[in-house]
Image (cartoon, grey):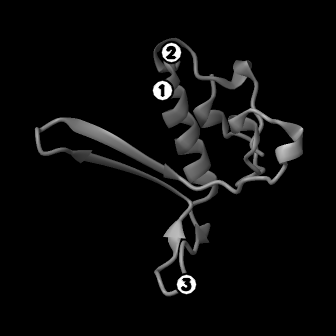
Amino acid sequence: MTAFTAAQLPTGLRAPDTVEKIVLWGAYILRRFTAKKTFLRQSGLAEESICSISRFTDADGNNKVQIILIMPEIDAPEQNLADWMTVDAVATTSIPASFSG
């Protein structure tokens, strides 16, 4: 897992102050670590990146960001874990300084 502490969150004008911003911040970190990692959704289909971030303009002219993140899930129903605690690591590298403070 890519562990972090609150001290590593960006500060000042770069500080994420909503859940949406935290999610996008984390997605950019994971994409950096997993740029060459792929998975096969179904036999016969092309391999897909486990983390992708796309920016586009929708049909109404609004800018959007789409995050696709595929994470392995642990099988531990007997532990009665919260949903966000059931994912396994996709990366184990430390967060680069450019994403912190």
Q: Does residue 25 lie above or below 47 as drawn?
A: above
Asked whether 94 or 75 is in front, the reply is 75
Q: What type is the residue that disc 3 sits on?
A: Ser
Residue shown at 75% from the left, 51% from the top: 89
Q: Are marks 2 and 1 in contact (CB under 8 Å)?
A: yes
Residue 77 place in picture, x, y as percent: 82, 46
Task: Report the disc number at residue 60.
Answer: none
Residue 93 place in picture, x, y as percent: 75, 49
Residue shown at 49% from the left, 35% from the top: 24
Which residue position is annotated with label 1?
21
Task: Report the disc number at residue 17.
Answer: 2
Asked whether 18 or 42 is in front, the reply is 42
Which residue position is annotated with label 3?
43
Of tags 1 and 3, the one toward the viewer is 3
Residue shown at 81% from the left, 54% from the top: 75
In the image, farthest residue toward the front: 78
